[in-house]
Amino acid sequence: MPLYRDVGIVLRTHKLGEADRIITVLTRERGKIRTVAKGVRRTTSRFGARLEPGMHVDLQCYEGRNLDTVTQAVGLDAWGDVAARDYTRWTAAAAILETADRLTEEHEPARQHYLLLAGALRSLAGDAHDGGLILDAYLLRALAVAGWAPSFHDCARCGDPGPHRAFHVASGGALCPSCRIPGSAAPAPATMSLLAALLAGDWAVADASDPRHRREGSGLVAAFLQWHLERGVLSLRHVDRSVQPRPTSPGPAPLDPLDPQARVPSTEQGSAPATPTTLRGIG
């Protein structure tokens, strides 16, 4: 059977038989794949913890009739392991991984989703920004990659230049007074500015945002995501949204760690060079 090699990020695993696991991986070239890791649940497994959720791996597999089989796995970055040391970051990582799984189809090219996911997990592991902000930035950009970019400034229905106060999930975002639908939300202007900043990668604005606007924005993002996925992301219920004080220092605006032009150091010594993260200019 033909062998192939690819790099990818483990999205989830589940048990198969007494000692095996089915590993779902979002790969750079082949999109989402499901592959069997034989004997991985044994303490003597050669794979160790390299096939756990959030791990960035270089895989060698051979194609099977129904499921492929992993023959080799080399760890590149232990993003999941690093995030797991902090509850806030781990709950955000779990929601990111579940969303990536929901937004991608098996064997469909998904390089943009892969790059975006890599950037988000790298940012969480490196504690580049507040975990809740990284999560919401990822969710907004993942929706944009899927073709569902929300509007936070101009009217989503008629294109009338904003800013506008009304926000309607089913209509695609901000609405002008003429297009406003009964039942539309009326978030604070600072909340709309925060969400626009997360979508565009303006971290100077995002990092300086008030906790109450972050909470309001997170609710809008979750509602927008649920509308398009038709059911909620279960991991979002467990995300720790507490805002931890972060040191601030004067200097240039921070790089966008989810942007392909940003290069954030890897979380493991000796690992492969940092991978570009996602398309530039989303939003």
Image (spheres, grey):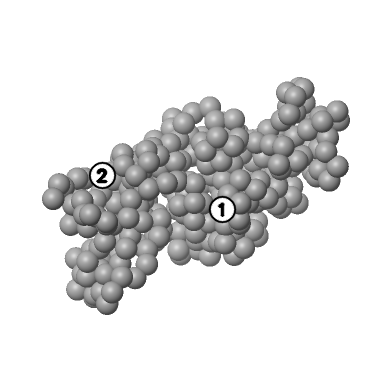
Q: Secondary structure at mark 2?
A: strand
Can you say whether 237 is above or below 105 in the image? below
Give x and y (percent) for residue 19.
Answer: 25, 74
* Left or right: residue 199 compared with residue 34: right
* Residue closest to the eye, 206 or 239: 239
Vertical arrangement, residue 185 with respect to residue 263, above or below: below
The C terminus: image quadrant: top right
Residue occupying image coordinates x 80% and y 44% = 185
Residue 6 disc label:
2
Q: Horizontal and vertical percent for residue 51?
A: 31, 60
Q: Is residue 43 left or right of residue 215?
A: left
Task: Kindly identify the amino acid type of the residue bearing the numbered disc 2.
Answer: Asp
Foreground pick, 88 / 247 = 88
Residue type, label 1 = Gly
Count numbered badges in the picture: 2
Q: Which of the 4 quarters of the picture holds residue 233?
A: bottom right
- Residue at (75, 41) in percent of width and height: 168
Judging by the rendered image, the residue that carries numbered circle 1 is: 131
Would residue 147 be visible to someone looking at this image? yes
Residue 232 x %, y %: 61, 57
